[in-house]
Amino acid sequence: MDQIVEYFLAALLVIGGVFAIVGSFGLLKLPTTMQRLHAPTKATTIGVGSALISSMLYFWFFEGTLSWHELMITLFLFLTAPITANFIAKAQLHLAVKPEDLPPSGVGTAWATFDPEVESVSPTLIRDRAPD
């Protein structure tokens, strides 16, 4: 049984290492900010999460103690990575896209914002608009 657990933990570590390397490589080599954003938030999070989970399982099986620190760090990473990616993507859109290049929002503002005073509109695709 111990050998099966060791193989499983080793596989988790190798998978985590591969994901971390792929995420780091994507962060360095992808050409645009929006493409580079995808690599660390997805691949590296899975890589670090896999290493932390393997550490937690090691201490549970071989030391007889359940380490909550690794579980809390993993949950923190899984919760904060998408939020951080959303903030970075929104900042990139504000810097790179001119308001006049955006499709009409239907509420008089260029960006989608929540305003309880404004009546909601259904989204339209760019190809559904009438030609200028």
Image (cartoon, grey):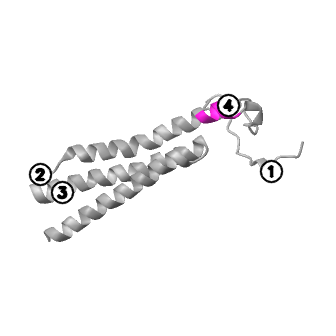
Answer with mark 3 or mark 2, whichever residue precedes in sequence. Answer: 3
Horizontally, is 77 left or right of 65 in the view?
Answer: right
Q: CA distance from mark 3 to mark 4?
A: 55 Å
Q: Is residue 76 magenta?
A: no
Magenta-colored span:
92-97
Residue carrying label 4: 118
Which mark is on residue 24? none
**Between marks 3 and 4 in the image, the one whose residue lies nearer the viewer:** 3
The percent position of residue 32, horizontal first and vertical second, equals 61, 43
Three-letter code, disc 1 = Asp
Residue carrying label 3: 58
Residue at 22% across / 43% down in the picture? 69
**Between marks 4 and 1 in the image, the one whose residue lies nearer the viewer:** 1
Answer with mark 4 or mark 1, whichever residue precedes in sequence. Answer: 4
Answer with mark 3 or mark 4, whichever residue precedes in sequence. Answer: 3
Residue at 57% across / 38% down in the picture? 89
**Between marks 2 and 1 in the image, the one whose residue lies nearer the viewer:** 2
Q: CA distance from mark 1 to mark 3?
A: 56 Å
Whether label 4 touches label 1, CB < 8 Å: no
Which mark is on residue 128? 1
Three-letter code, disc 3 = Tyr
What secondary structure is found at the residue carrying circle 3?
A: helix
Three-letter code, disc 4 = Val
Q: CA distance from mark 4 to mark 1?
A: 23 Å
Answer with mark 2 or mark 4, whichever residue precedes in sequence. Answer: 2
- Which of the pair 62/82 is nearer the observer? 62
Q: Considering the whole magenta stretch, tell me its main secondary structure.
A: helix
